[in-house]
Amino acid sequence: MTERPVLDPAPRGARLGSARQLSERVAAYLREAIMVGELPASEFVRMEHVAARLGVSATPVREALMILQGEGAVRWEPRRGFRVVPLSRRDVDDLFAVQAHVAGELAARAAAALSVAQLARLRAVQRELESAAEAGQLDRVGELNHEVHRTINRAADSPRLAAMLNLFVHYVPRTYYGQVAGWAEATTHDHAPVLDALAAGDPAAARDAMAEHIRHIGQLLVTHLERTGALPAGTASG
């Protein structure tokens, strides 16, 4: 019998607030619900249930589902509603292959641009990240990991390329990684060769180290999704 985690059952209306990006926040919630199997593959999403759980109206839920339809995560069926599209191993592999390529290129560009002060700050953040990981503070690890990657991506001075990367990163909500076995350890371990390459000003090494890091995270995610039953073991294509 597969383990199927569930999301926080508490109403999230207050957490989501009344920001203009409400539909995007609901979309992030739904992405995570699909990833953990709370919204199982091939089942219909009950908009009224989602709206009640999040404490929002039906409008942002409908808009969020339209966003997910554009991403291929759900499919609209006339007179029936939005159905969750089954996730495949190839889907996840493709997502992280592209992410690894783009993140690697940004790291290569950052290697020629990071200042001494920025490198020192990255090292300090990484040390704090490692301490948080040892203490089991996974939320803090996620925040610090985001800061490391954001600093590198901004240093690349390639805003359009960084924006493309963000599109792929959004497919897997940042808060979800804390549930993936081995993620915190990989984050503390894999960053070392990236930071060393950046400090050496070696674009090729930075590209390779970052790409390998992203591919490693993708492999951990596949294992996690298979274990929880969100991704059928051995699937190849959608």
Image (spheres, rainbow, N blue to C red):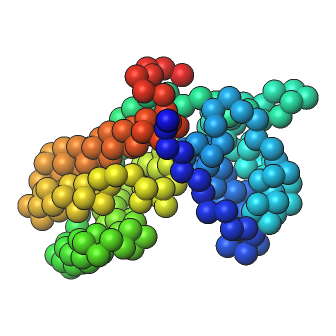
Residue nearer the viewer, 41 or 169:
41
- Give the total number of marks visible in the rendering: 0
Residue at the image position 49 percent from the left and 44 percent from the top: 3
Look at the image and tell me whether residue 99 can be seen: no
Q: For residue 190, which quarter of the picture?
A: bottom left
Q: Please provide percent x and percent y for residue 221.
A: 39, 43
Give the answer, above or below, for where 196 lies relative to 27. Answer: below
Residue nearer the viewer, 74 or 100:
74
Q: Please provide percent x and percent y for residue 160.
A: 46, 51
Look at the image and tell me whether residue 186 can be seen: yes
Q: Please provide percent x and percent y for residue 49.
A: 81, 52
Please, which residue is most extreme toward the left here? 200
Q: Please provide percent x and percent y for residue 142.
A: 40, 66
Q: Is residue 228 left or right of residue 158?
A: right
Residue at the image position 54 percent from the left and 50 percent from the top: 5
Residue at the image position 63 percent from the left and 55 percent from the top: 29
Residue at the image position 29 percent from the left and 75 percent from the top: 135
Give the answer, above or below, for where 38 lies relative to 151. Answer: above
Q: For residue 192, which quarter of the picture?
A: bottom left
- Rendered-image quadrant of the C terminus: top right
Please, which residue is most extreme toward the right here? 79
Q: Is residue 123 left or right of residue 151?
A: left
Residue nearer the viewer, 15 or 9:
9
